[in-house]
Image (cartoon, helix red, strand yellow):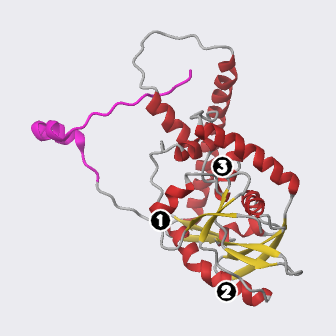
Amino acid sequence: MNVNVFVETEGLSREEWLSYRKRGIGGSDVAAILGISKWKSAVGLWLDKTNQSNEAVEENEAMQWGNIMEPVIRNHFAEVMGKSVVEVKAMLQHPEYPFMLADVDGLTVDDEGNPAILEIKTASEYKRNEWEDDIPAYYQTQVQHYLCVTGAAKAYVAVLIGGNSFKVFEVDADSEVQRMLIAVEKEFWNKVQNMVRPEIDGSDAATGLLDRAYRGGISEQIVLPEEAIEYVDLYIEASAEEDNAKAKKQDAANHIKEFMRDYDRAKCLNHAISWKPVSSERLDSKALKENEPEIYQKYVKTSTSRRFTVK
C-alpha cells in the first residue's frame, strides 16, 4: 500500500492523539462533514479543528468498552476468517492529500492475498436493526475514507452486536465515492485553514457559537431580509409540530402508566419501561430569600442569556 505514516501512536497519551487528529480529517469526521453523523455536525467539527470548541472530548462508557473489546474482536476475526491481522500503531496519511488521515484497527489480506484493512465496531442490542443487511451509512463513509487513504481495495468490518452476536461485512473500494470524499474533505479543510465557518445548522454546537458571538444589547428593531422568511416559517411550523408531538407523547405515556398502575418496571416486546418513585432535594430559593436575605444575596448569582421567540 502506498501510504505515509503521519505519526507513531504507540505511547501517545489520549490528549496527544487528539491533538494530532486536529491536524487533518479522520475517518470518523467524514459523516459530520456530509451531515449524516449522529454525534457531530459540520459546524461542531469545524470548531474542534480550529480549536474553538468548548466541548470536552471525554471517553464515555461505550467508548471505553469499545477499546477494551477491540483486541478481543481482532483476535476473533483472525480465528473465524483464518486470516492474519496486524495491529496498526500509527496514524496514516494519504500520500497526495496530506489532510486525509486514518486510524485503522488492523491490516489483513483479502482472499487473493492482497492488502486489506480491518475496521472493528461494537454496537448495542438497540442498534441491531442498523446492522441487519449492511453497515450503517455513517460507517460506510468512514471505511471508504480509510480505503482511500491506504489505497487498499477491500475492507472487512467486524462488529460485535449486543455483546454476543458477531458479524463480518466486506466492503470494496468505490472510486466514485472516494472522488466525492476527496472533494468535500478538501473543501472543508480549506475552510478550516482559512477560518471560514461552514453554514449554520441546527446543532448544539452552532447554537453555542451564535450565543458566544452575538451578545445582544441593541434595542433598535431590525427588519430581516427576504431570505429570513423561509426560516421564520420553518420555525413556526416546527413549533406547531413540536407541540403536537409533545401532546401525543404525553397521551401515550399516560396510557402506559394506567397499564402499569403501581408496578415500577414493565416490559413490552423488546422495550423496558420504568416508572419508579424518585426522591430529590431542592433548594427553596424563595423561602431562603425571605428568611435569610443576607445569605441569599451572598450566594445569588446573576447570569445573562438571550431568549429567542417568534410570534
Q: Position of residue 49 (x, y in %)?
A: 55, 46
| Location of residue 127 with respect to 195 vertically, above or below | below
Q: Dot 2 lies on which element?
A: helix
Pick the front one: 218 or 276: 218
| Location of residue 61 with respect to 247 vertically, above or below | below
Residue 75: mark: 2
**In the image, which residues are magenta?**
282-311
Q: Earlier in the sequence, mark 2 or mark 1?
A: 1
Q: Position of residue 238 (x, y in %)?
A: 65, 34
Residue 32: mark: 3
Q: Dot 1 lies on which element?
A: helix
Pick the front one: 280 or 94: 94
- Residue at left 46%, top 26%? 214
Q: Earlier in the sequence, mark 3 or mark 2?
A: 3
Pick the front one: 277 or 119: 119
Pick the front one: 137 or 289: 137
Quadrant in the rendering for residue 224: top right
Q: How many neighbours does mark 3 have within 10 angstroms: few (below 14), some (14-19), or many (20 or more)? A: some
Label 1 amino acid? Answer: Arg
Measured in 3D between alpha carbons, the distance from the residue under mark 3 to the one under mark 2, in whole angstroms, is: 30 Å
Question: Disc count in the image?
Answer: 3
Label 3 amino acid? Answer: Ala
